[in-house]
Image (cartoon, rainbow, N blue to C red):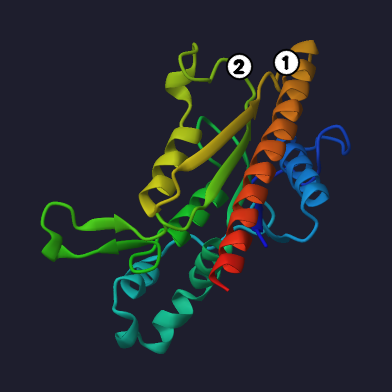
């Protein structure tokens, strides 16, 4: 069974095309999850909506607690890390992470940045050892086979690689860097553009993104099915 973690980061509560002033990223992430559930109804879907319920930002107490060895943590330190522990546990349990992630002022929404700061944890998602010399850090999730899907939306257009505003796009690249740092390097990206124009180009961009979501679900589900079949075959062979 695959566990899919569905995260939304938009401040808009509804979906475009369904709710007034709804979110394009919520629309895309919901489409992905609904199509995945139809293809693989036995899989588990975990839900996290940081747009509606933002994680607490990292504080000085959090940093002190996180860099204190677990066996030496006082009760207040464990309390300071409790939310982060839940988020890390949820991430570790997931095989596929699907994020509805709009661009806000050229970067990720603040609640999603708070989420990132809570899951990048020494001793849990990345390791650190001064004895390793010039390479003291290593990713702790590198062998877990996790995949990340980023479904974005932008008000303007031309933010893709090599396009006119690519230098202002600090969404996908920054998220790829962070998740790669903890060992999640397979990343798939789709985006809607032209939101501020509200014309035929937006409609075309939405339609193209939805077709892309459908193709991506089909490809990832088929890949997962092959992996499941291989695992089952190996179990039978060993038995």
The percent position of residue 84, horizontal first and vertical second, equals 49, 68
Asked if residue 49 lies left or right of residue 189, the reply is right
Image point (57%, 33%), residue name? 189
Q: Is residue 194 above or below residue 134?
A: above
Mark 2 vs 1, N-terminal side: 2
Q: Is residue 63 above or below residue 164?
A: below
Identify which residue, 222 or 69, lies in the foreground: 222
The residue to which callout 1 is attached is: 197
Image point (66%, 37%), residue name? 219
Judged from the image, the secondary structure of the residue bearing numbered disc 2 is loop
Image point (47%, 53%), residue name? 116
Contact, mark 2 vs mark 1 (Cβ under 8 Å): yes
CA distance for labels 2 and 1: 10 Å
Asked if residue 121 lies left or right of residue 127, the reply is right
The C terminus sits in image quarter: bottom right
Asked if residue 41 lies left or right of residue 216, the reply is right
The residue to which callout 2 is attached is: 157
Whether residue 171 appears in this view of the structure is no
Q: Quadrant location of residue 14? A: top right
Q: Quadrant location of residue 35? A: top right
The percent position of residue 230, horizontal first and vertical second, equals 59, 55
Q: Residues within 10 Å of mark 2 (few under 14, many from 20)?
A: many
The percent position of residue 226, horizontal first and vertical second, equals 63, 48
Identify which residue, 45 or 60, lies in the foreground: 45
Judged from the image, the secondary structure of the residue bearing numbered disc 1 is loop
Image point (61%, 60%), residue name? 233
Whether residue 2 appears in this view of the structure is yes
Q: Residues within 10 Å of mark 1 (few under 14, many from 20)?
A: few
The N terminus sits in image quarter: bottom right
């Amino acid at each position: 069974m695959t566990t899919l973690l569905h995260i939304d980061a938009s401040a808009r509560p509804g979906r475009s095309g369904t709710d007034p002033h709804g979110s394009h990223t919520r629309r895309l992430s919901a489409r992905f999850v609904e199509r995945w559930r139809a293809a693989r109804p036995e899989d588990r879907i975990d839900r996290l909506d940081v747009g509606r319920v933002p994680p607490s930002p990292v504080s000085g107490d959090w940093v002190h607690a996180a860099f204190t060895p677990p066996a030496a943590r006082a009760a207040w330190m464990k309390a300071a890390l409790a939310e982060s522990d839940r988020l890390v546990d949820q991430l570790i349990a997931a095989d596929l992470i699907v994020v509805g992630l709009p661009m806000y002022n050229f970067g990720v929404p603040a609640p999603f940045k708070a989420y990132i700061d809570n899951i990048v944890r020494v001793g849990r998602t990345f390791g650190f050892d001064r004895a390793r010399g010039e390479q003291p850090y290593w990713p702790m999730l590198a062998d877990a086979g996790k995949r990340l899907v980023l479904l974005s939306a932008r008000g303007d257009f031309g933010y893709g690689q090599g396009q006119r505003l690519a230098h202002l796009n600090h969404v996908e690249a920054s998220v790829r860097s962070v998740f790669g740092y903890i060992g999640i390097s397979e990343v798939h990206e789709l985006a809607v553009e032209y939101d501020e124009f509200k014309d035929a180009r937006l409609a075309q961009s939405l339609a193209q993104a939805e077709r892309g979501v459908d193709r991506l679900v089909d490809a990832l589900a088929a890949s997962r099915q092959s992996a499941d079949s291989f695992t089952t075959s190996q179990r039978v062979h060993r038995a």
